[in-house]
Each structure stands twice: as structure tokens, then as C-alpha cells.
Image (cartoon, grey):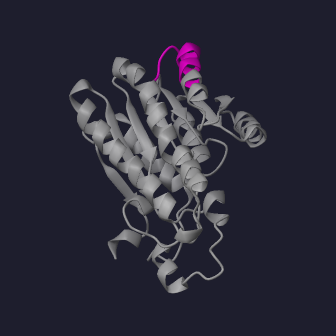
Amino acid sequence: MTRFDGKVAFVTGAASGIGLATATRLASEGARVYASDINAELLAQEMGRLGEEGLVLHSRVLDVTDEADCRAAVAECVATFGKLDILCNVAGMVLTRNFLDVTAEAWDRVMTVNSRSVFVLCHAAMPHLLETGGNIVNISSAAGLQGLPYNSVYCASKGAVLLLSKSLAVEFASRGVRVNAVCPGAVDTPLVKNIKLPEDADMALYGRMFPLTGYYAQAEEIAGAVAYLASDEAKFVTGSALVIDGGQTAV
């Protein structure tokens, strides 16, 4: 498939998980991908592996908590490729903790990584997307739709991403820029595997996080949804929250 021939895509969190799967999927369908992540070593390793497989992506270390770095990365992407068609905000973190143990510092950190960075990158990319009639796909979460125990900050941050996406979709619909969000549930990624529950966690409550299907999604499944939303096949889709959660939020 070559749905993205001639398109330029900027992907954050591209060294692992959904970000890596998304960068790989877009590149495999013809996009020129600007792949970014804070983990320099892992990013170089994965980009080298993809290069050996015949996919060449431009990569850059990026700290999404640094506004200047985000804006510089977008500018560099446009300078490198001449334009920007697709922005995929995938970078994120999770904090699983009893609410009374959440500090203001921890709150600020999660909100900065998960939601402020999305605002900054959307803000920096929008003028370029207006020129190309491009689109944005943001990774929210099933946790942005449904309250989950021990995930107060994560839920708040992903809810912010979802409603920012909807607001931008409405504001820019008549100007030719689409904005959508994907809301994954449990996905087999390093982010999910590294979740550590509080020692006194009520597993009956936490069980709401698990999919009804009995298995976790693969990152490539989520990347497929991102690719659909970013493609011209979804030209009538904007302001959508595409839920991929194995029935988690259906209960």
C-alpha cells in the first residue's frame, strides 16, 4: 500500500510501542517520517533496524516537555522535507498511584508529558498543516473516557488530549485540517508492562482496566488505526475518538 506517497509525517514516542509501530506503518506505506523520542539510544537502535529492513526514517532526539525543543523539531522537519502533512502525538507516560500519594510535582510531570506537549506540538504544526490540508492524530486512551482507580493523573491528562483534539477538530474543520484521537485500552507495550500497582490496590476495582476479549492489543493494531485516520480514506472523519479497548469502556 502507498497511501502516504509524497506525505510527510512527524511522530513522537517513536522509539518503542505505539510510536514505533506508527512510524513503521507510515513509512512502509510511503510516508517520509520524522521520528522523534527522548530515548536517544533506543531511537538510534530501532531506526538502524528499520534501515536494515529497507525503511529510511529521519530521526531526532526530542524532549516533549521542552517547548523550545518541540518547536525547533517541527521547524527542522519542515526544513528537511519542505512541508508537514501529518502529526502523530504518541509520546506519553503513566503514573499508577494512590490519589493521596500523588504530589503536585508528579501531577505537573504527567500533564506536561501527556497533554501540554500535545498542545505545544499541535500549536507549532498547525500553520504548516493549514498549508497542506493535513491532519493530526493524537493518542488519548480509554482512560480518557472512563475513570480508573490509581490513575487519576493519567486519566486527567488523556481526557485533556481527547477534548483538545475535539476542540481543534471543530475550530479547523472549515479550514481543511482534520484532528482525531485514538483511545487504546490495554496494549502490549513497554508502557503497560511497566505499570506497578500500589501495594494495597483493590484488584476488583483495577480489573476494570482489562479487556473483555481476554487479550491485549498489539501496538501494530493501534498503528493501523492511526494510519487509517491519517489517510485520505478518513477524509470525512474529524473530531473522532476511535476506541480500541477490547470492550473495556463498553461495560
Q: Which residue is more in the foreground, 188 or 67?
A: 67
Residue 188 in sight from this viewpoint: yes
Residue 123 image-quadrant placement: top left
**What residue is drawn where x is 52% and y is 37%?**
26
For the C terminus, give its image quadrant: bottom left
Image side of residue 34 versus residue 241, left or right: right
Say above or below: 53 vs 129.
below
Residue 66's place in the image compared with 175, above or below, is: below
Q: Is residue 81 magenta?
A: yes
Image coordinates of residue 48 in percent, x first then y, are: 76, 35
Residue 32: quadrant of the picture: top right
When asked about the image quadrant of residue 179, the answer is: top left
Q: Position of residue 201 (x, y in %)?
A: 58, 81
Stretch of the chain drawn in magenta: 73-84
Residue 33: % across, % down = 57, 30
Q: Is residue 141 above or below residue 62?
A: below
- Residue 226 spot, x, y in % from top left: 44, 45
Which residue is drawn at the image coordinates 56% and 30% (left, top)? Answer: 67
User: Is 179 situated left or right of 22 in this image?
Assistant: left
Count up the numbered dots: 0
* Residue 247 visible in rendering: no
Taken as a whole, is the magenta stretch helix, strand or loop? helix
